[in-house]
Amino acid sequence: MTNESRNRILVVDDVAMIKDMVEKVLTEQGFVVSSAGDGAEALKAIRRDRPDLLILDWELPKLSGRDLCKILKGQASTKYIPVIMLTARTATRDVVEGLNTGADDYMTKPFNELELLARVRALFRLKELEYELEAKNRLLEQQNQELEQLATRDGLTRLFNHRHFQERLAFEYSRVARYGSPMSLILMDIDHFKRFNDTYGHMVGDLVLKQSADLVVSCVRECDIPARYGGEEFVVILPQCGIEDAATVAERIRSRFERNSFDGGESGMLTVTVSLGFSVASKGSPDSPAELIRLADEALYCAKRSGRNQVVRAVQQVSSA
């Protein structure tokens, strides 16, 4: 099968002799050709079958070739179909007008068969180059997304990594400073995780960390920013979230961990709990993102010291709830 046979052409002309001649020339070269006798019929065929190229007579009944071309070039689904305008008009202004409607090429009747084939093949070569460029752009976009994932995501849990967390925290803190809406930060730690790893091994520990990350994501909003803080510690930035809402989210996470069974592979179903501390930023308090982290860390330490598996709010806060 030739390359041409994979390229479908619609020939539109109300003069049967011209239409049949064009169709015969193209079919003999292996192109897949269909035809229409007026603009309205052609528009239906195009919407139904989406040809790869259109050879279009300027003068057509019901819907002129010029108007049909304008319609096609104005719609996203058909704007990239190449159009060769075929007409008896030879004046320069007519050629210019035809090209201004969006036609990609222009031929006058009577046409030369070799010239017609050369122009058709040239447009198909151009279309192939466009396809190749589009494919390369898609590949480049995919590679850029993968690079962004590598740069911003933790390799094990697929949560945001520590560096990206710091960047997002600085951004969200700047919004608090600018607009005054509160923002909360939850810092959490899986209880006795070192003992857990010593008992079940690091492979099982990694399984539980992955599932823990998924559990945290399921407990927060789409606009929230969960990240792996380090080791068995996770952190969540809660934009536009005050004390009461932050406490609700933190308690939701704690209770979900307490009730959840984790798949430990050959070790069976396992349970872990988490301790959580959270702090809240309002306009002017605390005075930096680092201080917001320090307050949440102190609250987390208090939760662990007080028996673990609980939520503690940082006490050095100016309430914004």
Image (cartoon, rainbow, N blue to C red):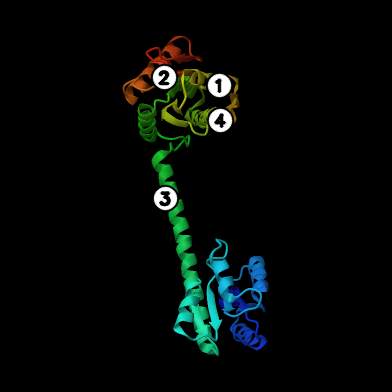
Task: Mark 3 or mark 2: name the one nearer the start of the chain.
Answer: 3
On residue 218, the disc is 4
Label 4 CA crowd tier, 10 Å (few <14, some 14–19, many 20+)? few
Q: Which residue is identified by label 1?
A: 252
Residue found 68% across the figure and 73% down from its top = 41
Q: Nearer the viewer, mark 3 or mark 2?
A: 2
Q: CA distance from mark 3 to mark 4?
A: 27 Å
In screen coordinates, is 165 left or right of 200? left
Q: Which residue is identified by label 3?
A: 144
Residue 110 position in % (x across, y down): 55, 90
On residue 146, the disc is none
Q: CA distance from mark 3 to mark 2?
A: 35 Å
Residue kind at label 2, given as amino acid type: Ser
Local SS, label 3: helix
Q: Is residue 173 above or below residue 300?
A: below
Local SS, label 1: helix
Q: Which residue is identified by label 2?
A: 279
Label 2 CA crowd tier, 10 Å (few <14, some 14–19, many 20+)? many
Residue found 46% across the figure and 69% down from its top = 129
Residue kind at label 3, given as amino acid type: Asn
Task: Mark 3 or mark 1: name the one nearer the start of the chain.
Answer: 3
Q: CA distance from mark 4 to mark 2?
A: 21 Å
Label 3 CA crowd tier, 10 Å (few <14, some 14–19, many 20+)? few
Local SS, label 4: helix
